[in-house]
């Protein structure tokens, strides 16, 4: 797999034997892995197609530092204090 300069990679993690499933991740050019939450809504908003993503071993994803989770629902909520429960009544509705 190659990554174009200034772009990231969209992959699914899995086991060495899997070829069609896994958790979605975006790997940025600086080497951070961001797990995509709330699939398929977040995938649609980011315009990623899980059927087109390569499956890579879990161990490959662990080589990268972890970034924040990419979540449509979290993006609609104001920032919360670390460790505090997010109050859903503070969040905007899904567009």
Image (cartoon, rainbow, N blue to C red):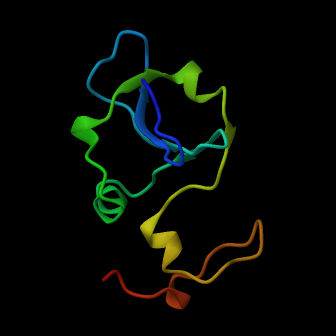
Residue 59 shown left or right of residue 15 in the figure: right
Q: Quadrant of residue 41?
A: bottom left
Outermost residue toward the top in this view:
17
Residue 20 shown left or right of residue 80 in the figure: left
Q: Position of residue 85 (x, y in %)?
A: 66, 73
Q: Position of residue 30 (x, y in %)?
A: 67, 43
User: In the picture, which quadrant includes the N terminus?
Assistant: top left
Q: Is residue 78 above or below residue 14?
A: below
- What's the residue at 58%, 19% (across, down)? 59
- What's the residue at 42%, 11% (across, down)? 16
The count of marks equals 0
Outermost residue toward the front in this view:
5
Q: Quadrant of residue 95?
A: bottom left
Q: Position of residue 23 (x, y in %)?
A: 42, 37
Outermost residue toward the left in this view:
51
Q: Position of residue 74 (x, y in %)?
A: 52, 71
Q: Is residue 93 above or below residue 26?
A: below
- What's the residue at 34%, 28% (across, down)? 54
Q: Nearer the viewer, residue 86 or 56?
A: 56
Residue 23 shown left or right of residue 34 in the figure: left
């Amino acid at each position: 797999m190659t990554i174009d300069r200034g772009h990231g990679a969209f992959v699914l993690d899995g086991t060495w034997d899997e070829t069609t499933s896994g958790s979605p991740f975006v790997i940025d050019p600086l080497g951070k892995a961001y797990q995509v939450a709330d699939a398929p809504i977040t995938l649609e908003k980011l315009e990623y197609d899980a059927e087109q993503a390569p499956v890579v071993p879990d161990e490959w994803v662990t080589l990268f530092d972890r970034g924040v989770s990419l979540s449509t629902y979290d993006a609609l909520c104001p920032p919360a204090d670390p460790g505090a429960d997010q109050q859903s009544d503070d969040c905007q509705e899904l567009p």
